């Protein structure tokens, strides 16, 4: 009745001994790490619970989420973020109805106009200028809009670079290589300060769209290289097969090359969008009050002066959480793609 | 496609492309005339009249803008090279730990890589600067017989002083890049076949010696390209120096634009100086790559 199976314990003990305490050097390192981890854990918990003053985070939660969006309209960005979050949860754990799964992509794309409508207002909602946007809402908006726009641009650039027309091929390679050689902050700077100089007198684009435009210019060059990698790994026999079926050039690109290249490049593409999400923080230097910008403005408030650690730890957690959600979604997408492939 | 069609298509596209560029340049000239700035580089030789906190070569505020920009470029080079070395050392160690036998070490290095890669670099830089260095006390924090001092002014080591801005940038960039380099090193080590490990073990070589003498040289050709792209990323990321107030090439360009309003000229200078920095890194890595391939051939 009370027979305890002791075998697994012995095996894991032996395994532990083999991996952690195999020789003197290993033993010393293992012991050091154990001491280090326990000291760090104890100190961190002590700081988290007793020493840290979380008032700077708790009393400013709406600011982190929505920036200076008018308080009685804050349900609008909140609705958008909640709809994004519930869509992610639904994608991961929702029921596997076929008709719904097929239309999930449309739902995801639909969140962009929904978000823009909720933020800008119009039709039944009071209009709100983009300079009141901020916080996590703005960070997510920048990420979503720029990655959505840079995908088609990236595909076009990659196809142009593979083109047999020398002029097009040369121009797109120059663009891609130049863009990859300059730092992002220079491109964003171009977007904020130089784009107005290139526009005709009287036409202005607002700051958020200039930022999205600059991010799109930058990211599409990187996406183009990822997709080019995908295009190059498609065997030539595929094109020959499509030719012999009588498909014309555009049909080959649309039905044979792009779907396969996208599937191969998918892990790289999701990495790009996670990188883009992190890089939106650069806009804090260039005057948009996104998540990090909110942190900076709160730290400039005399009431919370010097509480750097609390704010930075909190912001790091938020960034880390959103990145993790994006990574999990990406892995889910990759798995679905491979399952589809085996079904064919 | 027929040849005629090809030529017409290219002509059409170049017509649209250069037409668009013409319109943009036309707008630019109109705007520059309107603001009364024009486009020239003669301002480069006027006195800069701003002070710099850090200068590897003598600099005063009466020196020209061109000299200030050159000092900024040297400052960039200084921080890029020193964090490049530190990041490589750190990254190699973590990469070894990540592939090693000790499961605790593997766990810790995996945790390190995840945390560093999932938070923005700008946030990390601000953390190191505002918490790591400015959080220290005014007076000497650690003082060892006037040889080694740490305070919120930076580190002083037997006559050499490093400002806290430089150190925060160095630390932030090295730690951020080391997480990526560790993954490159891990990929390289995993690309060496398992038989090589078994071979040196059966020859009685110690684990660490075998890793450095046998495995690493074979992994290098796979590591170098990844390392080069990480170094280029590091050079690009060094422009975030402006967030901690280190006067690198971007920060100085920014100051000059605020002072003179010469945005277009400064942007061009920024691009050229980055081109130079990139060429320097890629060419050096190319030489290293050739040396490695050569030494493998004749050994």
Image (cartoon, grey):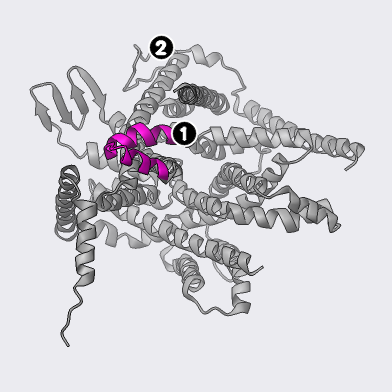
Query: Element at badge 2?
Result: loop
Residue A211's place in the image compared with A67, above or below, is above
Q: Residue at x 24, y 47 (%)?
A: A305
Residue B60, given in percent of the width and then of the height, sits at 35, 13
The question of residue A313 being in magenta is answered with no
Residue A168 vs residue A229: left or right? right
Binning the other alpha carbons within 10 Å of mark 2 as few (below 14), some (14 to 19) or many (20 upward) gives: some
Residue at 65% x, 35% y is A175
| Badge 1: chain ID | B
B286 above or below A15?
A: above
The dot on residue A24 is none
Residue A91 seen in the figure: yes
Question: Is A5 left, or right, of B55 in this rendering?
Answer: left
- Residue B204 in the magenta stretch? The answer is yes
Query: Where residue A344 sits in the image (x, y, percent)?
Result: 67, 68
Query: Badge 1 local density, few (<14 within 10 Å), some, or many (20+)?
Result: many
Tag 1's secondary structure? Answer: helix
Residue under the image location 34 percent in, 21 percent down: B52
Question: What's drawn in magenta, residue-wise?
Answer: B195-224
Q: Quadrant of the N terminus of chain B?
A: top right
Q: What residue does disc 1 label?
A: B236
Q: Is residue B299 left or right of residue B145?
A: right
| Count of numbered circles in the view | 2
In depth, the one of A309 and A174 nearer the eye is A174
Left or right: residue A41 versus residue A290 is left
The majority secondary structure of the magenta stretch comes to helix
Q: Position of residue B203 (x, y in %)?
A: 31, 37
For the C terminus of chain B, which image quadrant? top left
- The residue closer to the viewer here, A78 or B258, is A78
- The residue where tag 2 is placed is B63
């Amino acid at each position: 009745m009370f027979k305890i199976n002791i075998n697994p314990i012995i095996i894991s003990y032996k395994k532990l001994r083999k991996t952690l305490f195999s020789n003197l050097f290993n033993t010393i390192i293992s012991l050091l790490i154990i001491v280090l981890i326990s000291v760090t854990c104890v100190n961190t918990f002590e700081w988290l619970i007793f020493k840290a003053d979380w008032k700077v985070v708790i009393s400013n939660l709406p600011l982190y989420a929505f920036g200076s969006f008018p308080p009685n309209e804050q349900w609008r960005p909140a609705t958008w973020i909640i709809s994004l979050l519930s869509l992610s949860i639904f994608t991961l754990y929702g029921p596997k109805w076929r008709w719904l799964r097929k239309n999930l992509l449309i739902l995801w794309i639909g969140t962009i106009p929904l978000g823009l409508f909720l933020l800008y207002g119009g039709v039944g909602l009071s209009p709100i200028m983009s300079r009141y946007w901020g916080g996590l809402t703005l960070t997510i908006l920048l990420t979503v809009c720029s990655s959505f726009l840079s995908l088609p641009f990236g595909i076009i650039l990659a196809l142009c670079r593979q083109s047999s027309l020398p002029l097009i091929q040369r121009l797109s390679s120059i663009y891609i290589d130049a863009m990859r050689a300059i730092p992002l902050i220079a491109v964003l700077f171009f977007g904020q300060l130089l784009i107005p100089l290139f526009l005709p007198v009287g036409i202005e684009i607002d700051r958020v769209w200039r930022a999205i435009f600059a991010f799109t210019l930058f990211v599409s060059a990187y996406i183009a290289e990822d997709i080019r990698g995908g295009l190059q790994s498609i065997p030539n026999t595929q094109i020959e097969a499509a030719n012999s079926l009588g498909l014309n050039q555009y049909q080959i690109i649309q039905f044979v090359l792009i779907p396969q290249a996208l599937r191969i490049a998918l892990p790289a593409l999701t990495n790009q969008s996670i990188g883009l999400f992190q890089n939106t923080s650069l806009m804090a230097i260039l005057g948009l009050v996104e998540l990090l910008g909110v942190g900076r403005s709160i730290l400039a408030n005399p009431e919370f002066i010097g509480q750097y650690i609390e704010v930075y730890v909190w912001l790091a957690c938020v960034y880390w959480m959103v990145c993790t959600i994006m990574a999990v979604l990406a892995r889910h997408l990759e798995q679905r793609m491979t399952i589809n492939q085996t079904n064919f | 496609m027929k040849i005629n069609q090809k030529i017409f298509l290219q002509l059409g596209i170049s017509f649209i492309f250069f037409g668009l560029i013409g319109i943009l340049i036309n707008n630019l000239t109109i705007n520059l005339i309107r603001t009364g700035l024009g486009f020239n580089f003669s301002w480069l030789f006027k006195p800069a009249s701003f002070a710099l906190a850090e200068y590897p070569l003598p600099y005063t505020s009466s020196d020209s803008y061109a000299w200030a920009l050159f000092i900024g470029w040297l400052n960039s080079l200084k921080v890029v090279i020193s964090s490049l070395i530190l990041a490589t050392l750190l990254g190699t160690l973590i990469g070894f730990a990540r592939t090693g036998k000790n499961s605790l070490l593997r766990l810790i290095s995996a945790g390190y890589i995840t945390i560093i890669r999932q938070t923005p670099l700008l946030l990390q830089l601000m953390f190191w600067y505002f918490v790591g260095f400015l959080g220290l006390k005014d007076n000497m924090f650690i003082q060892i017989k006037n040889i080694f001092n740490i305070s919120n002014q930076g580190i002083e080591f037997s006559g050499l002083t490093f400002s806290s801005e430089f150190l925060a940038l160095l630390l932030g960039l090295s730690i951020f890049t080391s997480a990526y380099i560790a993954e490159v090193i891990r990929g390289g080590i995993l690309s060496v076949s398992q038989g090589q490990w078994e071979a040196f073990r059966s020859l009685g070589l110690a684990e660490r010696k075998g890793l450095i003498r046998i495995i690493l040289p074979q992994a290098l050709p796979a590591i170098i390209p990844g390392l080069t792209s990480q170094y280029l990323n590091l050079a690009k990321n060094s422009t975030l120096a402006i967030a901690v107030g280190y006067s690198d090439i971007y920060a100085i360009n920014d100051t000059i634009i605020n002072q003179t309003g010469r945005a277009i000229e400064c942007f061009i200078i920024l691009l050229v100086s980055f081109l130079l920095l990139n060429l320097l890194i890629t060419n050096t890595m190319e030489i290293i790559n050739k040396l490695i391939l050569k030494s493998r051939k004749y050994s």
